[in-house]
Amino acid sequence: MNKGNYKCPLTQALGVIGGKWKPLIIYQLEKSKKRFGEIDTNIPGISRKVLTTQLNELVEDKLVERTAYAETPPRVEYSLTEKGKELIPILRSIAKWGNYLVQ
Amino acid sequence: MNKGNYKCPLTQALGVIGGKWKPLIIYQLEKSKKRFGEIDTNIPGISRKVLTTQLNELVEDKLVERTAYAETPPRVEYSLTEKGKELIPILRSIAKWGNYLVQ
DNA sequence: CTTATTAGTTACCACAAAGTAACAATATTT
DNA sequence: AAATATTGTTACTTTGTGGTAACTAATAAG
């Protein structure tokens, strides 16, 4: 009856997108690539430390791509990969479902 | 640019379905209502304590309905509400997306 | 009157995730 | 020579979540 618990694709997927700020980060990157600082100021309340770790995890999970330019001060741009873009409609359906929860 | 952070419907929704075992619990109830003990034995690894708290949260969030019968030993049945049933196709799309993560 | 059954509760512990604040690296500008 | 800008890192603390194990209530069965 149970499909295998630790290797359940649903659990895995929720692990990958389930960080406290990750959906917000992914939404930030929906329309265009963004710099670290842009994301930081666009998401009020997140700390740079947490933003870094969640971005790193998203990069590691191949939902987000990181491009660093050898400039000073440094410029680093983040953008969605194809796998990340596939998430957008799914996140939208979750958000639509969750709309009744707000207020 | 940011729609409001703490009242973001996406974050709210993920908060509601994001417990470690909640998607599995919801899947358990997909086909039919089930008793507490049934869910417990069908999800290997979950403890009764955690099952209780996650079920209670699902009930509080109105995704699951609890029906208790005044028998001895007690019988308690859990089933999905309409709001909970609406989640099934969404969970399925997440699982489909997450399939590549497994193995 | 002891045992079994079911659906929990309670107290306590462990670990992971997130938050805070200070520091770092490097070239350009003042 | 000091300040500025940007993208982090580091050490430390706090909070949240889940796990373990023992206990409970109520009645029926032996």
Image (cartoon, coloured by chain):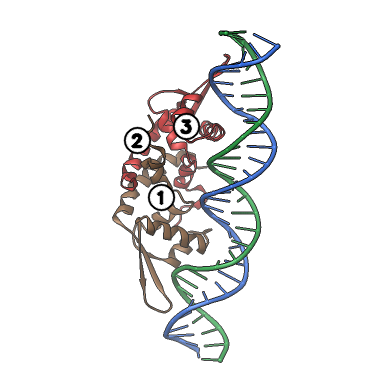
Chain colours: A red, B brown, C green, D blue
Marks 2/3 in contact by CB < 8 Å: the verdict is no
Label 1 in the same subunit as label 3: no
CA distance separating discs 2 and 1: 19 Å
Residue highlighted by disc 1:
B16
- On residue A89, which mark appears? 2
CA distance separating discs 2 and 3: 14 Å
- On residue A1, which mark appears? none
In the image, taking residue B99 as reference, residue D9 lies left or right, namely right
Label 2 in the same subunit as label 1: no
Horizontal and vertical percent position of residue B103: 52, 42
Q: Chain of mark 3?
A: A
- On residue A63, which mark appears? 3
For badge 1, the amino acid type reads: Val
Name the residue nearer the viewer: D26 or B44: D26
Horizontal and vertical percent position of residue B66: 36, 65
Check the image and report above or below for A8 versus A88.
Answer: below
Specify few, some or many for label 3: CA neighbours under 10 Å numbering under 14, 14-19, or 20 or more: many
Question: At 37% from the left edge and 25% from the top edge, which residue is drawn?
Answer: A31
